[in-house]
Amino acid sequence: MIDAAAYILPGIVPTLESELVFLCDRLGVTMDWITRRTNKREVVDVRKLIAYILMSKGFASVDIARKLNVDHATVLYYNKKVQERMDIYRYYREQVMELMETKKVK
C-alpha cells in the first residue's frame, strides 16, 4: 500500500494511486468499499466525489474509471452531477472545496 502522506513532500508529483488512497483515508472508506459493483447511494455518492476531485486534479477519466471499477463515461457523468450539485448547494460546494484543499502535514 502506498503512503498517502508521501505526496505532500515538495518536489514529489502525486500519482493517481496516492491521491485515491489519501481521499479514501480522508473520507473514512476503503478501496474495496468504493470499487465494489453496487449502486447503493452511499457508495455511489462517495465515488462521485472522488471522481470529481481526481478529474479536477488533472487525471484522465479512463484511468479514474479503471481504479473505481466503472466505465469512463460514468466518471464523466459523476463529474457533471457533482458540478450541478455544487452549483445548487453552497454548503456542499464548501465541503468539496475544503476536501480538495486538504493536505496531510506531518
Image (cartoon, grey):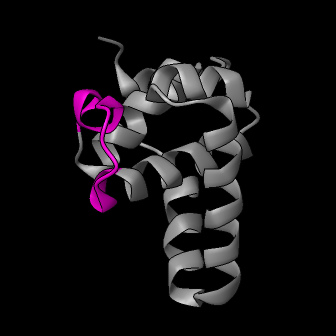
Where residue 42 appears, x then y in whole percent?
Answer: 29, 59
Left or right of 89 in this view: 18:
left
- From the viewer's perspective, is residue 87 above or below residue 26? below
Magenta stretch bounds: 30-43
**Quarter of the rendering containing residue 58:** top right
Comparing 54 with 102, the one in front is 54
Q: Is residue 32 magenta?
A: yes
Direction from residue 26 to residue 18 in the image, left or right: right
Q: Position of residue 38 (x, y in %)?
A: 30, 42
Task: Please say whether residue 5 is one of the residues in the magenta stretch.
Answer: no
Identify the residue at horizontal 64%, vertical 65% (top origin): 81
The answer to whether residue 105 is seen in the rendering is: no
On-image quarter of the N terminus? top left
Image coordinates for residue 77, horizontal then vertical, percent: 67, 52
Which residue is located at x 28 percent, y 31 percent? Answer: 36
Of 66 and 6, nearer the camera is 66
Q: Which quadrant of the figure contains the C terminus? A: top left
Residue 29, picture quadrant: top left
Q: Is residue 9 above or below residue 104?
A: above
Instruction: Work out whether 67 lies above or below 93.
Output: above
Name the residue rendered at 50%, 46% in the picture: 50
